[in-house]
Amino acid sequence: MTSARDIMHPGVECVPSHETLDRAAQMMRDMNVGSLPICGPGDKLSGILTDRDIVVKCVAVGKDPAKMTAADLADGTPVWCDASADESDVISLMENNKIRRMPVIEDHMLVGMISEADLAQHLSEDKLAHFVATVTAAPPSTGQQTR
């Protein structure tokens, strides 16, 4: 049985919730990653910050990334899995929540992250294709056109 621990990349670093978005972007650049978990007081996981979040929810709406913090973009309790979770449970959680990054927790501590790249290294082509199709599928149409 393949577990989340087998799939994840260990050694994940959090961006503190009080850290500014410009500093978070620098951390992403320095670590060559596109996302960071947001950790609040007591290193409690409070969200996931992506480079896209910084662009879309800060820069594109005219806000200053030197003044906004990671906490400003934290969206409540993120979806996570236990390090001992079975591969199929991990995939189901990610597909059902349409997420591309999954924090891995063990004994209440963040121990790793699972990304699409990690899945690509561990899943069969069929499972990976199903995952990508599910997570990237457009939401059902509401009858309104968007541009």
Image: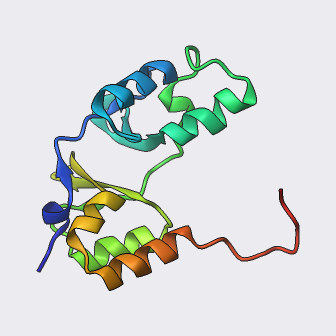
Quadrant into which the C terminus falls: bottom right
Res. 47 image quadrant: top left
Horizontal side, residue 128 vs residue 109: left or right: right
Q: Is residue 56 above or below residue 113?
A: above
Q: How is the image coloured?
A: rainbow
Q: Is residue 119 above or below residue 72?
A: below
Quadrant into which the N terminus falls: bottom left
Q: Pick whichever, 73 or 63, lies toward us.
A: 63
Q: Pick whichever, 129 or 100, lies toward us.
A: 129
Horizontal side, residue 42 vs residue 16: left or right: left
Coordinates of residue 104 in the picture (x, y in percent): 25, 55
Q: Which residue is at a point 50% across and 76% down the rendered structure image?
A: 133
Q: Which residue is at a point 50% across and 31% down the rendered structure image?
A: 71
- Figure disc tally: 0
Q: Which residue lies furthest to the front in this view?
A: 125
Res. 56 image quadrant: top right
Q: Residue furthest bottom?
A: 126
Q: Which residue lies furthest to the top in this view?
A: 66
Coordinates of residue 49 in the picture (x, y in percent): 46, 39
Q: In this view, does 113 lie above or below 141?
A: above
Coordinates of residue 70 in the picture (x, y in percent): 48, 29
Q: Is residue 69 above or below residue 48?
A: above
Res. 138 image quadrant: bottom right
Horizontal side, residue 95 vs residue 104: left or right: right
Q: Pick whichever, 110 or 42, lies toward us.
A: 110
Q: Which residue is at a point 55% across and 41% down the rendered structure image?
A: 52
Q: Which residue is at a point 45% across and 26% down the rendered structure image?
A: 25
